[in-house]
Amino acid sequence: QVQLVESGGGLVQAGGSLRLSCVASGRFGFLNRMGWYRQGPGKQRELVATFTTGISTDYSDSVKGRFTISRDNAKNTIYLQMNSLKPEDTALYYCNGYSSPLNKMYWGQGTQVTVSS
């Protein structure tokens, strides 16, 4: 089993920055893709940024140039640095992990990000 725990959300003014963290525990070694998704009020969950081990990093068009995904393997942690935040970035942000060998997807509980105008 894999556990993903997010932190770092909060309330920030437009133009501000936040950094989200996601700590993985359990059998996370099987995860070959990790990333961040978000779900805004009345919206469907959408991809924000992901990286696939040894292959690529992908961002949604709405966050390119503003958000950066990174990881610290020694700490079993991935990060999402969010700069130049906009009110439309307000959402519940979820950490996600996918294991292709197990064909399983894992989710954290989410951390709320609220951007005021």
Image: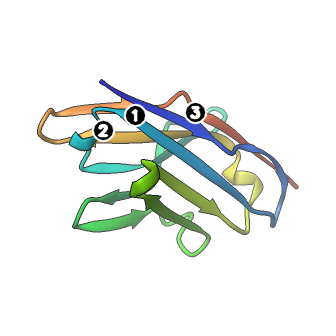
Residue type pointed to by label 3: Gly
* Quadrant hosting residue 63: bottom right
Against 30, is 62 above or below?
below
* Image location of residue 107, percent across then percent down: 42, 31
* Image location of residue 93, percent across then percent down: 58, 41
Q: Are marks 2 and 3 in contact (CB under 8 Å)?
A: no
Against 105, is 67 above or below?
below
The numbered dot on residue 25 is: 1
Q: Residue at x 67, y 34 (%)?
A: 41
Q: Are marks 2 and 1 in contact (CB under 8 Å)?
A: yes
Residue type pointed to by label 2: Phe
Tell me if 107 is positioned left or right of 105 in this view.
right
* Quadrant hosting residue 1: top left
Q: Residue at x 45, y 59 (%)?
A: 72
Q: Which residue is mark 2?
A: 28
Residue type pointed to by label 1: Ser
Residue 62 or residue 35, whichever sits in front? 35
The numbered dot on residue 110 is: 3
Q: Residue at x 42, y 39 (%)?
A: 24
Tell me if 67 is positioned left or right of 35 in this view.
right
